[in-house]
Image (cartoon, grey):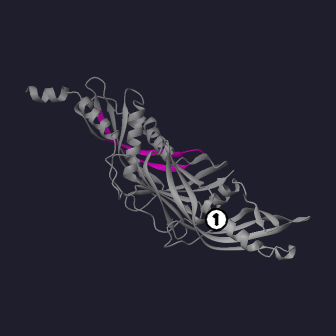
């Protein structure tokens, strides 16, 4: 007779503490051959634009050459960068066009003549952790071909083309690494990031700072423009759970605990547990269906149907809090989504201000959510 009564009166606090500890737990050690739970794809057009802007912020390549009694000062800037299909290349294969001039002097005579060059180079992509963010950089690893055109013969400097070419070959290899993208941050904490060349663009593979062991189903092909972000739903759910427990009570001493999440065409399905860990406390489960909309400043989740599920014995007489399920609770998930994939975000990169805008959120295969968008320099 006493056992059912004692069970009914038992505090749910140990259960709540266990759920909170699981959500905020440190991830297991990262294996050397880790599988990504997030993949960011940058289209060929976007990589070209990122490289153009990064290079435009850099000083021109210049030096002074001695050619017997003559001197020459070439000055070249990168005019255009075009990403080439790079299957089988460890990095990115680029066609680079350079434009500039060469100032020269020979005895009492001097002048300036136009100069241009074209090169095919292989650049390596590296990922470096900087605080909460990961910075990806590119650096020339190999110059596969280089053509230089300087009208040296016209001023009596026949060896000028060869000397400029020799200098430029070394200068491209010695050029410092350039910033390409910034990934991660407080909203999307990452343990690891690596780059992988693609036939048309660049893939950035990431492991989130979550305790779940899951791999993202990587989308085939590359986006024709902009970017595409694929996130394993379990990883996104883990981010949302951690965000919710860190946030704490949303009202009425209630803590939201998203426990299941899946995306559908134009919507989502959410399994939500509400904890009230005050006194003996109680918990209630809800199944929520809703719509997903991309607004100008954020991703908007709107509940269309809220159904009560299981509940603890202490919740028998508690208010079902459906209003919270439809309103305040969903903001917890929205906050997690906005942090991971804000509909509009800005970042300064190499002196250039970039604006990224999400245009679509859709389900992928094998429990993956796919976010598509555009990015442009401002």
How many marks do you count on the picture?
1
- Residue visible at 7% across and 27% down? 1
Q: Which residue is mark 1?
A: 170
Q: Residue furthest top?
A: 279
Q: Is residue 153 above or below residue 251?
A: below
Find residue 202 and report its horizontal and vertical position in percent.
53, 63
Which region is colored magenta? 283-308
Query: Which of 32 and 342 lies nearest the eye of the viewer?
Result: 32
Evaluate whether residue 22 shows in this view: yes
Residue 158 horizontal/vertical position (percent): 80, 76
Main SS, magenta residues: strand
In the image, farthest residue toward the right: 108
Let me know if residue 12 appears in the view. Answer: no
Q: Is residue 336 left or right of residue 312?
A: right
Q: Is residue 220 covered in magenta?
A: no
Residue depicted at x 74% and y 63%: 76
């Amino acid at each position: 007779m006493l056992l059912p009564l004692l069970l009914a009166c038992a505090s749910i606090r140990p259960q709540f503490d266990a759920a909170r500890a699981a959500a905020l737990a440190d991830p297991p050690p990262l294996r050397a051959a880790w599988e990504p739970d997030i993949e960011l794809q940058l289209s060929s057009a976007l990589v070209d634009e990122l490289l153009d802007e990064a290079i435009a912020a850099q000083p021109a390549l210049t030096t002074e050459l001695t050619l017997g009694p003559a001197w020459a000062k070439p000055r070249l800037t990168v005019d255009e960068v075009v990403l080439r299909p790079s299957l089988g290349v460890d990095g990115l294969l680029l066609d680079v066009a350079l434009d500039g001039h060469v100032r020269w002097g020979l005895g009492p005579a001097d002048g300036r003549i136009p100069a241009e060059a074209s090169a095919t180079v292989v650049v390596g992509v590296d990922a470096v952790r900087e605080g909460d963010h990961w910075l990806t950089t590119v650096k020339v690893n190999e110059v596969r071909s280089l053509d230089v055109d300087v009208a040296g013969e016209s001023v009596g400097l026949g060896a000028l083309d060869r000397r400029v070419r020799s200098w430029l070959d070394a200068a491209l290899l010695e050029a410092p690494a350039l910033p390409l993208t910034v990934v991660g941050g407080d909203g999307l904490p990452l343990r690891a990031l690596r780059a992988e060349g693609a036939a048309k663009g660049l893939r950035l593979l990431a492991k989130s700072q979550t305790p779940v062991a899951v791999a993202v189903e990587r989308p085939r092909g590359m986006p024709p423009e902009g970017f595409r972000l694929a996130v394993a739903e379990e990883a996104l759910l883990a981010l949302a759970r951690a965000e919710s427990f860190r946030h704490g009570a949303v009202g009425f001493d209630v803590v939201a605990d998203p426990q299941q999440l899946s995306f559908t065409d134009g919507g989502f399905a959410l399994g939500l547990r509400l904890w009230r860990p005050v006194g003996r406390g109680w918990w209630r489960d809800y199944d929520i269906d809703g719509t997903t909309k991309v607004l100008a400043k954020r991703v908007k989740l709107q509940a269309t149907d809220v159904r009560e599920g299981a509940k603890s014995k202490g919740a028998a007489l508690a208010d079902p809090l459906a209003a919270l399920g439809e309103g305040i609770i969903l903001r917890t998930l929205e906050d997690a989504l906005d942090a991971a994939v804000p509909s509009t975000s800005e970042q300064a990169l190499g002196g250039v201000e970039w604006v990224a805008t999400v245009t679509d959120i859709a389900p992928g295969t094998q429990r993956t959510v796919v976010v598509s968008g555009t990015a442009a320099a401002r």
